[in-house]
Image: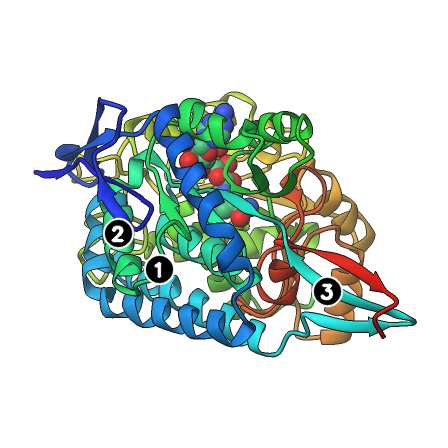
Amino acid sequence: MKIIDKIYIDGAFVTPHGDERFDLFNPATEQVIGQVRLADADDARAAIAAAKRAFPAFSRTSKHERVAMLKRLHGAVLAREDALCDAIVEEYGAPIERARWMALHASDVLLQAANTLEDYALVRHIGTAEVVMQPLGVAGLITPWNSNAGFICGKLAAALAAGCTAVVKPSEMSAIQTRVVTEALHDAQLPPGVFNIVTGRGDTVGAEISSHPDVAKLSFTGSTAVGRSILRTAAETFKRVTLELGGKSPMVILDDANFEDAIPLALQAGFMNSGQACIAGTRILVPQARLREFEEGMVAAVAGIHAGDPRDPATHIGPMVSQKQWERVQRYIGIGIDEGARLLAGGPGRPDGIDAGWFVRPTLFSGVRNDMTIAREEIFGPVLSIIAYRDESEAVSIANDTPYGLQAYVCSPDLERAGAVASQIVAGRVLVNTLAHEPAAPFGGFKQSGIGREYGTFGLEAFMEPKSVLGVV
Ligand code: NAD
């Protein structure tokens, strides 16, 4: 049992004022593996006050000093890679290969931010003005459970690079991972109060951060429903807001696609992070003329997808993070069947031979219409929908017929054609024949997938505001 009974405020691990205890589970076994003592609104206020005190000095640090700090943070998180990977597998259930990537990503984003800042002009001359990019103030950073360490480090990296101080509110379901990350960040010995980490519930700690007048900036990753309420609350005090929300990403398979490439790509895009990914390619758009061929290939390929023990290197899909998520995914599988979609693989219940753990059968529907619930709503599990289209223009219109616009995929050997399709898709990122991440390029959504962009220069600028000074040059 891991007991986590401290939060991190003003450079120290302290006992929270909040005294609610929250159980932590291993989703692969359903066993309780720990307990976290949750912070409350008082703790959030203490963290905000610490960040406010630290801001004047920190905001005046030079670019050079902040690059050095980010590099120290990178080294410290990298040094905990193994411990973080273990915590990710144990508490979140990510398959080992994915967990390794996630643990490395957490340190990598800090280095990326250092590199971005190094090349960034904080002061420019425009006409007769000197334009200074000024940090916004105290930043509230709120993260979900599906990539907790990466989101903490990524948001913190951009905030600190900009010269903001921060209060982080990680998911209450990721307290063991958060503890590993916090210990690592503490090792980097930044000035007290520059970052504070308070694990607590969304409706207490999260709500306090979202409404507090001393918080100038909010960066939130999570569900569209919570994002909407944060945006409303933030309006009261005109906080600058970055929201990274849900998705229902299309994987557009063009009619000249080579299915030997397209099928593995579609499955990896759909089942990434055990399907618990905002960018998962869950709507697979396939030309009607080649539908049968594609379905046969997918069924054969899904038979080789292994859902089970996340520590087994042969596993592609781990458990859902919680019983609640498991039930949610089961409900959507039921809705798919009830609405008349054709079940090609998987279905309700656990995979064969597994009787404990929040495991889901890798599930594939075909005959899906884009107005069905399973094509419209984010399921956040390994459940994919094949939707047939007649021609390219219908493919584009189905791809765009969604309230979301986070990511899209296009698959075709003809890059000019794929590029033309990509240009018509309303999404923050379109990946052509690849799943590779580009850390320097902006990431974020159109429409109800969010507001603003993270990563690289765009992500850095989200924590700053330009100030024009006239008469000095
Ligand atoms: P969630 O919205 O329930 O919670 C996210 C965070 O917000 C948690 O820390 C939670 O405690 C906090 N929160 C909850 N209510 C709050 C409130 N009223 N005020 C302030 N904070 C509050 O989401 P989740 O279930 O943790 O994560 C899954 C969701 O996140 C999915 O919908 C997924 O699409 C989305 N997501 C988006 C991205 C992206 O980059 N676009 C990435 C990962 C996950």
Instruction: Looking at the picture, tell me which residue is in the foreground, 127 or 447.
Output: 127
Left or right of residue 70: residue 258: right
The three-letter code of the residue at mark 1 reads Met
The quarter of the displayed image where residue 77 is located: bottom left
Q: Which sits earlier in the primary sequence, circle 3 or circle 2?
A: 2
What's the residue at 54%, 68% (across, down)?
Answer: 439
Q: Give the distance between the C-alpha atoms of the residues marked 3 and 2, in whole angstroms.
A: 40 Å
The three-letter code of the residue at mark 3 reads Val
- Residue 102: assigned label: 1
Q: Give the distance between the C-alpha atoms of the residues marked 1 and 2, in whole angstroms.
A: 8 Å
What's the residue at 37%, 46% (across, down)?
Answer: 196
Counting every numbered tag in the picture gives: 3
Label 3: which secondary element = strand
Residue 115 x %, y %: 52, 76
Residue matched to label 2: 88
Residue 24 x %, y %: 20, 34
**Circles 1 and 2: CB distance less than 8 Å?**
yes
Label 2: which secondary element = helix
Q: Residue furthest left?
A: 1
The three-letter code of the residue at mark 2 reads Ile
Left or right of residue 173: residue 340: right
Instruction: Looking at the picture, tell me which residue is in the foreground, 35 or 272.
Output: 35
Left or right of residue 369: residue 187: left
The quarter of the displayed image where residue 328 is located: top left
What's the residue at 35%, 61% (across, down)?
Answer: 190
Q: Residues within 10 Å of mark 1 (few under 14, many from 20)?
A: many
Left or right of residue 200: residue 402: right
Residue 57 x %, y %: 49, 58
Q: Which sits earlier in the primary sequence, circle 1 or circle 2?
A: 2
- Residue 132: assigned label: 3
366 to 315, vertically: above or below = above
